[in-house]
Image: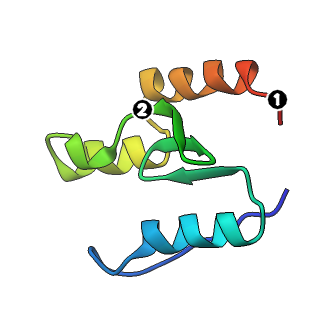
């Protein structure tokens, strides 16, 4: 498994670029903003942008929130990697 990270300020197109890269290199799975995405379908998680404060948003984005992490783990067991 290889992991790539896109770093930049809010609104600079990181999510858009991540999906473009995934399509170009036939990468099936992307984790973005607390969401597990396969091709163009959200499999698990919720967007950290919907959290009430910055600390919770960070915990969501990195799957540190226990219930959010469990939701993602359950989707992993259903997916065929």
Q: Nearer the viewer, residue 7 or 36?
A: 36
Q: Position of residue 77 (x, y in %)?
A: 74, 20
The quarter in which the C terminus is drawn is: top right
Q: Position of residue 17 (x, y in %)?
A: 51, 75
Q: Nearer the viewer, residue 59 or 71?
A: 71
Is 77 located above or below residue 55 in the figure?
above
Is 12 located above or below residue 32 in the figure?
below
**SS at mark 1?**
loop
Can you name the residue that lies furthest to the left here?
A: 52
- Between label 1 and label 2, give the one nearer the viewer: 1
Query: Taking 22 as reference, is 61 left or right?
Result: left
Q: Nearer the viewer, residue 7 or 78?
A: 78
Query: Taking 31 as reference, is 64 left or right?
Result: left
Q: Earlier in the sequence, mark 1 or mark 2?
A: 2
Q: Residue at x 74, y 58 (%)?
A: 27
The quarter in which the N terminus is drawn is: bottom right
Q: Residue at x 63, y 23 (%)?
A: 75
Query: Taking 19 as reference, is 52 left or right?
Result: left
Q: Position of residue 6 (x, y in %)?
A: 53, 75
Q: How is the image coloured?
A: rainbow
Is 54 located above or below residue 7 in the figure?
above
**SS at mark 2?**
loop
Q: Mark 2 and mark 1 in contact (Cβ < 8 Å)?
A: no
Q: CA distance from mark 1 to mark 2?
A: 24 Å
| Disc 2 target residue | 65
Number of residues whose C-alpha sits closer than 10 Å to that of mark 2, classed few (under 14), some (14–19) or many (20 or more)? some
Question: Which label is found at residue 80?
Answer: 1
Q: Residue at x 21, y 40 (%)?
A: 51
Q: Residue at x 56, y 50 (%)?
A: 31
In which quadrant of the rendered view does residue 25 lie?
A: bottom right
């Amino acid at each position: 498994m290889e992991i790539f990270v896109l770093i930049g300020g809010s609104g600079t197109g990181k999510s858009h670029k991540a999906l473009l890269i995934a399509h170009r290199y036939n990468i099936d799975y992307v984790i973005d903003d607390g969401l597990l995405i396969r091709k163009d379908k959200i499999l698990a998680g919720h967007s950290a942008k919907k959290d009430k404060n910055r600390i919770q948003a960070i915990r969501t984005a990195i799957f540190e929130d226990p219930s959010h992490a469990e939701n993602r783990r359950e989707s992993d067991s259903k997916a065929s990697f």
